Image (tube, grey):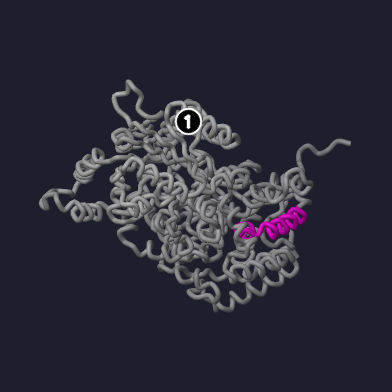
Amino acid sequence: MMDPRANAFKENAAKALANETLQSALSIAKPRFVDKRHKAKERLPEFDSLRDVARDIKNHTLAHLDLYLEAYEAKVKAQGGHVHWAATAEEGRRIILDLCRRFGARTVTKGKSMISEEIDLNEALERAGIAPVETDLGEYIVQLRGERPSHIIAPAVHLTKTEIESDFRRVHAHLPKARNLSEITAIVGEAREVLREKYAQADVGITGANYLVAETGTSIIVTNEGNGDLTQILPRAHIVLASIEKLVPTLEDVSTILRVLARSATGQEFSAYTTLSTGPRRKDDPDGPSEYHVVMLDNGRSRMLGTEFQDMLRCIRCGACMNHCPVYLSVGGHAYGWVYPGPMGAVLTPSLIGIEQSALLPNASTFCGRCEEVCPMRIPLPKMMRHWREREFSRHLAPATQRYGLKLWAFFATRPLLYRWASTIAHRALRLMAAGQGRMAFLPLAGAWTKHRDFPAPERKTFQEMWKEKRK
Amino acid sequence: MRQDAAAPPKPKVALFVTCLVDLFRPSVGFAAARLLEHAGCSVEVPSYQTCCGQPAYNSGDRQTAAAIASQVIELFAPYDYVVAPSGSCAGMLRSHYPVLFADGTPERAAADGFASKCHELVSFLVRVMKLESTSGYCDQPVTYHDSCSGLRELGIKDEPRRLLRQIPGLVLNEMQESQVCCGFGGTFCVKYPAISNSMVEQKIANVEKTGASLLLAGDLGCLMNMAGKLSRKGSKIEVRHVAEVLSGDLSHAPIAGEPRS
């Protein structure tokens, strides 16, 4: 798996805060994310009740996941497709490489898939001499730059038009130098032009799946560019790479969840393309792949079932939590150091790579609760981040200064008499240090606070002292 | 014997002072007590209260949080209501204490019962005491920051605005993103100072755009964070707890900023 850099979150965040391009890109994205979702929600009075239904559908599915997985597999097979089970990222890569070799693949087109990022598929393909070509515009851009997506639905949200233009000029060196790329439409047009050839060359198309339907054995992708359709229809073989929690019982269920997905993600009523694939090309089909394979990745998810983290498996990867997270919007997605950023990443990453590798993520929240407020699947993200902090605490993973500070505070907070005494002492000490000023620009042991802000001087006495005086 | 129907007994309210008010800003505690009395409550302040336990709870130390919760539940048992001038502490008492104890245990039942009598100050005045106006005073443009726990755990949004708007002379200039976190987050602000700083800078920028000369909120943590930033920037904007304005006593220096007269 991609070497996680989640433990460097603080250093990553410091760099991100100093990165002007990133800050400017985030400040452009922020109001758009928020306004669009808000307006979409306002236009649909039943939005919140649909969230309840969507949550219940996923809860039901997760409670009977084994049965639905079996039913789904049987349906796929009955339609001439194949299902491969991958317990780990390594197995997932091996299965896909074997399939690609079997199909003699030299070029593979790819639809947008975070699971592919999770298992480092592109690197594995490249090492095997197979060229992966990302066809989602954002993914294409980050691939050109040798980067990773910084957002689960807007992979290049950390960039501004200027960077993208210069990347295109650098990589598409065969195109006329004098061409005008100042408009977004020109950039999109150029990407389409370049990618069109790749679709035709590709031997295998790999897509993710937004949903897998147990009732019909169908995989569904939702896109705005139509790139997913070309990726899965034109090559000889279509490989669907999906994780096991993408399962939904029926098409009816999918249509319910789709009503909250795009609204939460991009503020659209519906994404431009919702594409269903059910097995390989049939005799009378005008087009489609002759081979249809589904790789079902577990990679730690079944371990979450039955734990306090099971609700996380309801996630439909809309990105609303990060779009509304003041921490994500301050530092961007790369700071999180692994595949999944923002609040959903702060919960999912420790589940998938271990809390030892990622303890800073569930701590990087003020528990402001905005993520849970907008989550279409009503996932209690702050509660689960707190569960991770509990695991971290019980394993003594937090820095020693934090643990001892907390212990000292707890000692007094659980002894009311001593607490009264200690708070009076603390009050006097603060008064002394303030030396008659209304504010302190420096305070011992509170450097993290006073580096950026003043500390207000306390009033004359503690409230309890004054209350006693007054009521005598 | 007939009871006097004219004077129903005053509800017995315990003020949950909060550690920050106790240590830094007693005037908020007095403002809260005055408002509660104005609304017809009899107010008491149990002197052996410490903290709601949030620092432990949010740091993953559930055991200490539960120990503190048990202590608080017992100390405040004799009162009809427990009211805190903080959405964050009230949210802890109301929304989080019950989950610290296993379902079906007597401790859980006690925590559930306790939770239902705990309130944040302004929402208590409006929702429970049906207060429609206060003897508040203010003649300057103000803006109001919704602190996260009050807003999202307790649904407090309209109540402070409703009481503020009835104050003669008060103009409420809403800021953009009033519902976005100020970056305080308890220990967050010292664990991730750079991110916290970026958040409070954005918050302050939104405050400044309103043209208000007084920033209000219902939580001292957020207020100290925003005040500290304004003060560091040399801003003249005053910062106060909403209870100070509602109670009409602005005789104490603001948390930040120069009082105008």
Residue under the point 34% across and 58% down: A23
Task: Single out the residue that lies furthest toward the top.
Answer: A284
**Which quadrant of the rendered structure holds the N terminus of chain B?**
top right
Q: Is A155 inside the magenta-drawn segment?
A: no
**Secondary element at tag 1:** strand
- Residue B207 placement, left or right of B94: left
Is residue B142 shown to the viewer in this render?
A: yes
Count of marks, rendered view: 1
Pointer 1 indicates a residue of which chain?
A
Q: Is residue A191 above or below residue A49?
A: below
- Residue B141 placement, left or right of A460: left
Task: Tell me which corner region of the image, top left, top right, bottom left or bottom right, holds residue A329.
Answer: bottom left
Q: In this view, does A73 lie above or below B261?
A: above
Residue A11's spot in the image, x, y percent?
Answer: 43, 66
Secondary structure mostly seen in the magenta stretch: helix
- Residue A56 placement, left or right of A340: right
Residue under the point 62% across and 55% down: B89
Between A280 and B249, the one lying in front of the other is A280
Is residue B11 shown to the viewer in this render?
A: no
> Badge 1 is on which residue?
A213
Q: Is B67 inside the magenta-drawn segment?
A: yes
Q: Residues within 10 Å of mark 1 (few under 14, many from 20)?
A: many
Residue A93's spot in the image, x, y percent?
Answer: 42, 48
Residue B248's spot in the image, x, y percent?
Answer: 56, 55
Residue bounds of the magenta highlight: B55-76
Say which amino acid is labelled 1. Val
